[in-house]
Amino acid sequence: MTALTPSSAEPLALYIHWPFCLAKCPYCDFNSHVRERMPEARFAAALRTELAHEAARLGRRKLGSIFFGGGTPSLMAPESVAALIADATTLFEPLPNLEITLEANPTSVESGRLSAFRQAGVNRVSLGIQALDDASLKFLGREHSAKQALAALEIARGLFPRITFDLIYARPGQTLADWQAELDTALSLVADHVSLYQLTIEPGTKFEALYRTGAFTLPDEDTAARLYQETSEVTARHGLAGYEVSNYARPGSESRHNLTYWRYGDYLGLGPGAHGRITQGDALFATRRHRAPEPWADRVERTGTGQTSQDALDPTDRAREMLLMGLRVTEGINAHRFTARTGLSLQDALDPVILEAALEEGYLEQTAETLRATPEGRLRLEALLGALVL
């Protein structure tokens, strides 16, 4: 059995990647690039061209969300953002509650553009704050100060109906009291949605080289686990529930765009290095675009698209991906939807011995309808998934 949910049955999520930043953060392994001069006009035009090309190929699908990510999309001209939103909502069929998110950094320049982004149609802003003390911001390579971060939150609160922001914890020397105070400060200003990430050392980053030489150390596993537990407790006091490993929201304020990823829905990724999962007929395709910005733009200008691959995923691949994404969210995986999207039953996709052990240890919960990770299981999710998924 390989039947998939028909592509027209669920709304599409649209991701638009702006690859440029003012500086490369030492912890970042995203596809981001620094340019002396920002090639705004060329890349905005290429994104519009690629969007039109994909819409012609996919047809007038329902559109549930647009997400401008990066890189630093708040470095885009608001006019470019407005044009892309207008194109997307013309070429596709937008849902009445279309969620349009733009990532922004809280430098004074970018904060000054927030009003224009709101006028362009953005209704949800994601602020990359990362820390609320200047020493930590300097360590993380950020271009803004703590004062600017708090000011940006205030500005955003007056402009956007929905706001989220990022913070990084388990930083060198960070204590439970430090983290609690930092979270309380931020959440007292904006308590709609937050993404709270544990600092990890990613391959190929500047931090990897520094960490290897002993330039800094990170909290041990027990301390990191206590910080994670503190995160859940502080956010809960502010009325936010953890609905994914690193994301917390008031009921109804969850990121609809990111839930499309975690629920293994269809998403179209545009721009350098963007990837997607698109259902066509009875097949689900993994798509990827050229990672380097200028070669991507060259391809778009020549052919209409920067896509470099489109591979049909077999049932085993689909099942593995859906498990890896779906067990991150508190709601877990619906067994019927799993079969509809992958062609396999949940039981056929899991190691039965590991599943039984994980259920006995209280890391997973399973009913006839759902498989979900418990809070204890989400703490160990990476190791658990590595053993559980066939």
Image (spheres, helix red, strand yellow):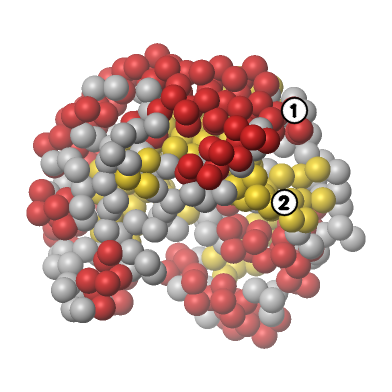
Q: Position of residue 100 (x, y in %)?
A: 49, 28
As drawn, is 131 to the left or to the right of 264? left
The three-letter amino acid code for the residue at tag 2 is Gln
Residue at label 1? 56
Which residue does the image show at 39% across and 58% down from the upper left? 29
Residue 293, label in figure: none
As drawn, is 84 to the left or to the right of 237? right
Q: Is residue 101 above or below residue 387?
A: above
Quadrant placement of the N terminus: bottom right
Residue 260's quadrant in the figure? top right
Q: Position of residue 312 (x, y in %)?
A: 77, 56
Which residue does the image show at 27% across and 66% down from the upper left? 207
Q: In this view, does 35 lie above or below 89?
A: below
Residue at label 2? 310
The three-letter amino acid code for the residue at tag 1 is Ala
Sequence-first disc among 2 and 1: 1
